[in-house]
Each structure stands twice: as structure tokens, then as C-alpha cells.
Amino acid sequence: MGGVRAYHERVVDHYNNPRNVGSFDKNDPDVGTGLVGAPACGDVMKLQIKVDSETGKIVDSCFKTFGCGSAIASSSVATEWIKGKPMEEVVSIKNSDIAKHLSLPPVKLHCSMLAEDAIKAAVKDYEAKRAKNTDVKQEEK
Ligand code: FES
Ligand code: FES
């Protein structure tokens, strides 16, 4: 009887109706792109943020995930959580928060880890881009 562990309804919901699937132009100076992979299973997640350069707030976010249901659900939750928040706040989102929200079983924890990594990578990419643009502007002076 019953060998398969049922997924939490939130996973199923985010899997069936993922929020914010899509792509932004990664060359847009207001966009940060995080592309991360899980060595454990080979799944890949791309998460992007659009930032208001005045306030440092994330005004929009989207993702594309090639991976399991838990990874898709984790990225979907991540995009919802980070929208409207300042960048310095979202880098402290923990995979354990996402895993708890989705009630992920231990074997699926690395799926939520992907989302945490992707958020951090997107912020880092945005900041690196901005630093580069500032350099260029200063050189032009
Ligand atoms: Fe890759 Fe989950 S193991 S889809
Ligand atoms: Fe690998 Fe979910 S991301 S099984």
C-alpha cells in the first residue's frame, strides 16, 4: 500500500500554475540573471530580477527551470517572494524557508537550494553589471 509520498498541495499548485515563468533581456542594465545547476541531478534554474536602480528594489522577477516539480515550485515561490523587496533583503532568503513553505521532503531539499542560489546569483550579476557600467561612465568623464 501507498509507497509514493504525496507532494504537498503547494508544490502541486506551483507546479501546475507556476508564477512568473519567462525571460527578461539579460543585456538590459536593470536586469540581473542567476543561472545555477544542481550537481546532484543536473537540473538547471534561471532566475532573473528587474531592479529599480534608484531604490535598489526588485520590481519584477521571472524564471525558467529545467527540472523536477520541486525545483519548479521552489523557483515559482522565490519569484513571488522577492518581488517588491530590496535586494539586500532577498539575499537572506534561505532554502529552508522555501522548503518549509512547500513542505519538501529531505531528498528534495537541494531543489530549494537551487532557488536560494539562483536569487543570490541574480543579485550578484546585477551588482557586477552595475559596477561595470559605473566604471565605464567614470572613464568617459
Ligand atoms: Fe532532475 Fe529531479 S532529478 S528532475
Ligand atoms: Fe534536482 Fe529537484 S532540482 S530533483
Image (spheres, rainbow, N blue to C red):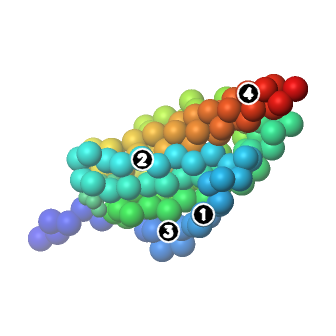
In the figure, is residue 139 to the left or right of 32? right
Judging depth in this view, the residue of 113 and 38 nearest the camera is 38
Mark 2 and mark 4 lie on one chain; the one further toward the N terminus is 2
Q: Dot 3 surroundings within 10 Å: few (below 14), some, or many (20 or more)?
A: few
Judging depth in this view, the residue of 56 and 111 nearest the camera is 56
Using the numbered discs, state the Cα–Cα distance from disc 4 to disc 3 in whole angstroms.
44 Å
Residue occupied by mark 3: 13
**Amino acid identity at mark 3:** Asp
**Residue depicted at x 35% and y 62%:** 67
In the figure, is residue 44 to the left or right of 115? left
Badge 3 element: helix
**Amino acid identity at mark 1:** Ser
Pair 2/4: label in front: 4
Of the numbered discs in the image, which one, if any, rests on residue 60?
none
Pair 3/1: label in front: 1
**Residue depicted at x 15% and y 65%:** 3
Residue occupied by mark 1: 23
Residue occupied by mark 4: 135
Using the numbered discs, state the Cα–Cα distance from disc 1 to disc 2 in whole angstroms.
15 Å
In the figure, is residue 92 to the left or right of 105? right
Of the numbered discs in the image, which one, if any, rests on residue 36?
2
Mark 4 and mark 3 lie on one chain; the one further toward the N terminus is 3
**Residue depicted at x 23% and y 47%:** 40
